[in-house]
Amino acid sequence: MNLHLLRGHDLRPPSRSTSVTPVAVPETPNSSQNGTTAEPVRKKALAFPVGPETREFYRRFYPDATKTEWNDWRWQLRTRVRTLAELDRIFVLSDDERSAVGHHSGSLPVGITPYYASLMGREDANEPLRRTHVMVGEEYVRLPGEEDDPLSEDHDTVVPGLVHRYPDRVLFLTTGTCSTYCRYCTRSRLVGNPGGEYQFNVRNWDKAFDYLEQHKEVRDVLLSGGDPLTIGDDKLDYLLGRLRRIKHIEFVRIGTKAPVVMPQRVTKDLVKMLKKHHPLWMSIHFTHPTELTPEVTESTARLADAGIPLGSQTVLLKDINDNAATMKTLVHGLLKRRVKPYYLYQCDPIKGSGHFRTSVDAGIEIIRSLRGHTTGYATPMFVIDAPGGGGKILMAPDSVVGRDGDDLLIRNFEGKVYRYPDPQGTLGRETVPLAAE
């Protein structure tokens, strides 16, 4: 659709009563009674692949669920594992996990979609995905430097839900609901409050729109939360269309984990709607190669086929993905799914996250192990989101060795030093020079 025409549409906020309840559809039989192949029923709803291990999981733990229901993102969302009893039904919990879950109250509850639970080790408390979503006692230990709001987002909030830190872009917190709750979440203070989750709120969104219309320096809006893809299609369509009406906003990004933890969310209706709002980009939160399932291959393919550039955002986590082999497997798998490894984040010092954080050296070493040893497309930027609201700061192996006269001495991925003629430069002048090879 023409962008100018789209911006000219008379957009109205959707009514709260317009939410759609999925219609249950029986599983399609393989053949009719007369021996001929039956026509598939609601083929779109059944298009998602279901791997054999996942199929075994849902038949064991959700025996009453049909394949249609399993592939319904709303069923996945409302059937999330949220209580100690539900965890106990699926996992062999350690004493530490059981105690930690039992003591929890307030924001950042347990919340795991049945699909994502099917990828976790049911008997191994140290399995990577399980460790990131089932709380343990260390979550209640607050180390020096940890804060409720380490990035000072509240300080930079200009209207409810809108964070304006960088000169030309804003963070738009659309909801406080996620399909799953990562235990290291930067916004653990905000998300998943029982009975108090941020929901669709036209009044707050309108305040954000008013601010954006007045601040013409803003050209880029990042939708986050919570997870914007937990919002229904009609409401998300309204939100994107309303932003598109603001002429100085050049493009919109969506930050989400739904295509990984609830890939069934990426329906054909969703991508059809998203295509109306280009230029639109998407940053997807990946953690571990275990997530690269046939279902995720399908969700990312649908988004990429819709012309949405995809980038990954990965948090560096101790004993989960903090080694070169795991990270290389992940980034190569992402590229095969048309997802560009974009950011590798040092874990934010959110309260109770000390058991997840590595040294910064570990991240530098991973980047060093990727540079030159695989394509640059597979090498993310390693960043620290500076505590106190300093924004993202790029961390990288230092390739500058020093200077020798007019030559800049630089080190390659093999550790060899080379000369580059740079008579006007000053970079490296304070570094002790080494002989070039």
Image: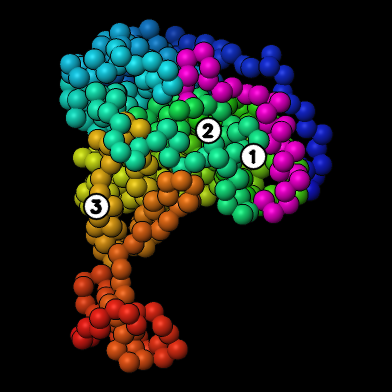
Q: Quadrant of the C terminus?
A: bottom left
In this figure, which residue is indicated by the disc labeled 3?
362
**Amino acid type assigned to the residue bearing label 1 in the image:** Val
In the displayed structure, does residue 234 sit left or right of residue 325? Answer: right
Q: Residues within 10 Å of mark 2 (few under 14, many from 20)?
A: many
Q: Residue at x 53, y 20 (%)?
A: 197
For the record, the magenta segment spans 191-218
Residue 225 tag number: 2
Instruction: Compare residues 211 and 93 and report the one nearer the observer.
Output: 211
Q: Is residue 127 magenta?
A: no
Tally the marks. 3
* Residue 323 visible in the displayed image: yes
Q: Residue farthest to the front?
A: 144
Q: Secondary structure at mark 1?
A: strand
Q: In the rendered image of this protein, does residue 58 appear above or below residue 3?
A: above
Residue 320 image point, x, y percent: 24, 39
Q: Between marks 2 and 1, how big is the CA–CA gap? A: 16 Å
Residue 402 left/right relative to 271: left
Query: Given the image, on which type of amino acid does mark 3 rest?
Result: Ala
Compared across the picture, whether 362 is left or right of 405 comes to left
Instruction: Determine which residue is flagged by label 1.
Output: 158
Dot placed on the residue nearer the N-terminal end, 3 or 2: 2
Whole-number angstrom distance, CA of label 1 to CA of label 3: 36 Å
Residue ID at (63%, 32%):
160
Residue 201 pos. (x, y %):
66, 24
- Where residue 250 sits: x, y (%)? 67, 52
